[in-house]
Image (cartoon, coloured by chain):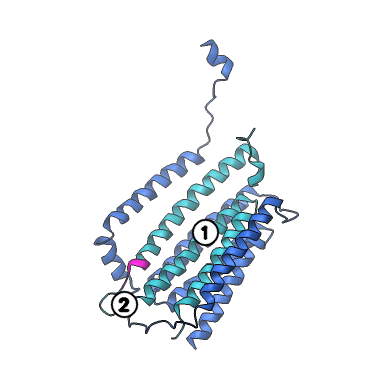
Chain colours: A blue, B cyan
Amino acid sequence: MLDIIFYIFAALTILSAILVPVSRNPVNGAMFMIVSFVSTACLYVLLNAYFLAVLQILVYAGAIIVLFLFIIMLLNVEQVKTLRPSFFSQIAGLLALCILSLGVGSLFLSGSANPSPELAVSAGSGIARNFGYMLFTKYMLPFQVSGFMLLVSMIGVILLSKKINVEVPSRKEQGDA
Amino acid sequence: MNMDLNAYLTVAGIIFSIGFFGVLLRRNALVMLMCLELMLNASNIALVAYSRYNATEQNQMMDGNTFVFFIITVAAAEVAVGLAIIVQLFRKTRTVMADELNTLRD
């Protein structure tokens, strides 16, 4: 039963992830990304990471995609007529396809050879209390660094999105001065 | 529940490849940023799967899950800064196509 659920959500994740770069309108791509992220959250539930599943939906599908949609609609970019990439990109894509399919294929084929070890019972591995314990003991420094990084990125975004209307003196004026 | 680790890793690998090809082949900077998010998401799936399949009764192996927590934080910050940069680029050049942004070249 759980296998069938896994296959359904894995297929949903992969199909909607394929449609993200393929869709011509970026708004459609963002919508398909929501589907991909929500079904990824379902995969997290299958892996007993309940807190991360909630976090995934809240942060990715709730905040990041909304930010994307907002910017896409703000910029009102013209739709592309053709999706054909340049010649060098095609060559690079072909090369990367060979390497990546080799990797994924070997991963997939080695699955039947060595079956996974017996799953340990870890009922409480994904709950929020364990996250709090880990964040305030073992990962205290990375936790504080990530908080500082959020502050830095916030200041950076405010600075970047301010309209800069300071007249830059031209080269001639600088030479005169 | 008998899904083995390789099934999850295969899903993660496929999603990573999709994001990789999106970054490589699309020219729209917004779509490239979205595909970057897909790649981060694929790494998250792999990390959660690893930490689930290596858990024991004594050692709950929360390290992978905590890593995913940090990756989500970094991804949110990265998207905010990246989109602000794209908006500034669009204000200056009226385009978000990556191959038209070649002012530094000439």
Q: Magenta region, mostly helix, strand or loop?
A: helix
Q: Amino acid at mark 1?
A: Glu
Residue A37 position within the rendered picture, expressed as x and y whole percent measured from the top left: 52, 67
Determine whether the residue tagged by mark 2 lies in a helix, strand or loop.
Answer: loop
State which quadrant residue B74 falls in: bottom left
Vertical side of A113 occupied by A15: above or below: above
Q: From where the camera sits, is residue A39 visible?
A: no
State which quadrant residue B32 falls in: bottom right
Instruction: Say which of B90 and B51 sits in front.
Output: B51
Residue wearing tag 2: A124
Say which mark, if any, is on residue A43. Answer: none
Q: Is residue A14 left or right of residue B78?
A: right
Residue A38 position within the rendered picture, expressed as x and y whole percent measured from the top left: 51, 70
Residue B101 position within the rendered picture, expressed as x and y whole percent measured from the top left: 63, 41
Q: Is residue A45 left or right of residue A139?
A: right
Dot 2 falls on which chain?
A
Dot 1 falls on which chain?
B
Residue at left offset 37%, top offset 63% = B67
Residue A153 position within the rendered picture, expressed as x and y whole percent measured from the top left: 42, 46
Q: Amino acid at mark 2?
A: Gly
The span shown in magenta is B61-65
Instruction: Say which of A53 and B49 sits in front.
Output: B49
Q: From where the camera sits, is residue A67 visible?
A: yes
Quick one: which residue is furthest to the right in this view? A81
Residue wearing tag 1: B37
Residues at marks 1 and 2 on the same chain: no
